[in-house]
Amino acid sequence: MRGYFVTATGTDIGKTYVSAGLLSAWRAQGHAVAATKPVMSGFAEDALEQSDAGRLLAAMGRAVTPDAVSEICLHRLAPPLAPNVAMRQAGVAQDYGAIRQFVERRLEGAAGCHLVEGAGGVMSPLTDDRLQIDLMADLDLPVILVTAPYLGSISHTLSALYALGARGLTVAAVVISQPSVSGGDVAAFAGELERFTQAPLFGIKYGEDAAGLARALLPGA
């Protein structure tokens, strides 16, 4: 099994856009694929296909049903808030151990390629006493950091890389996402970012598939 944790420099950066692209590309290349979205907020039961978990399931080639969403997502919460705040408001117990064990069980015995997608950015709260980066460190999977070309993103991206490095995490790829046609210039942003980091950089422009990134993350497979 080849596993990765997908995180980002912030919210609405394109994590699911990139994750779904990778899952679709690996499937097209003949690999078994799976994904886990431990906690999801901003969820509408009557719009399963539009949720992060729904988009991941579709990219896996699976039907998007309530049971399938529950299989890959432990907590789905309606308010579009940080997971800890959404859980607090919904009266859901914030059991970090249960969240971690849910992901570990999903990873046990998994074949092919498995993505674990976080919520929000690297330092976003997961529970009232744990951050997304704490789950990353406990799982110890290589990290795919998703960023995007917007004003201030160089600082946000370098700060995220610094935090990941401080926790001893391996950054497998920094993916510059352009999930909408109005997104900034991916190539220009990559040129600026590579002045300050040695991390492997990849760009996915609007409408492009993730085949190149998928092959780079599974060399020789």
Image (cartoon, grey):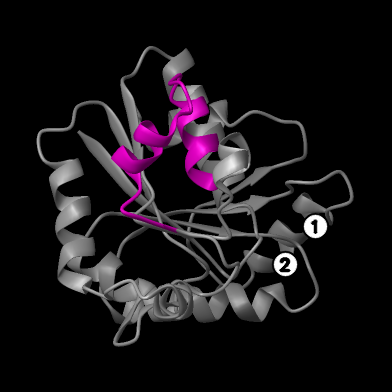
Q: Position of residue 186 (x, y in %)?
A: 76, 52
Looking at the picture, does residue 192 appear above or below residue 188?
A: below
| Residue situated in front as seen by the camera: 201 or 75 | 75
Residue where numbered disc 2 is placed: 192
Q: Is residue 134 left or right of residue 77?
A: left
Looking at the picture, does residue 155 appear above or below residue 104?
A: below
Quarter of the N terminus within the rendering: top left
Q: Position of residue 152 (x, y in %)?
A: 74, 79
Looking at the picture, does residue 17 appear above or below residue 137?
A: above
Q: Identity of the amino acid at label 2?
A: Glu
Which image quarter: residue 110? top left
Quarter of the C terminus within the rendering: top left
Q: Secondary structure at mark 2?
A: helix
Which image quarter: residue 49? top right
Residue where numbered disc 1 is placed: 188
Q: Is residue 153 left or right of residue 61?
A: right
Mark 1 Cα-neighbour bin, 10 Å: few <14, some 14–19, many ≥20: few
Please give the range of residues in magenta. Answer: 52-76
Q: Residue at x 64, y 28 (%)?
A: 209
Furthest-right residue in view? 182
Q: Position of residue 50 (x, y in %)?
A: 63, 40
- CB contact under 8 Å: marks 2 and 1: yes
Counting every numbered tag in the picture gives 2
Mark 2 Cα-neighbour bin, 10 Å: few <14, some 14–19, many ≥20: few
Q: Position of residue 66 (x, y in %)?
A: 42, 35
Q: Residue at x 80, y 75 (%)?
A: 151
Which image quarter: residue 196? bottom right
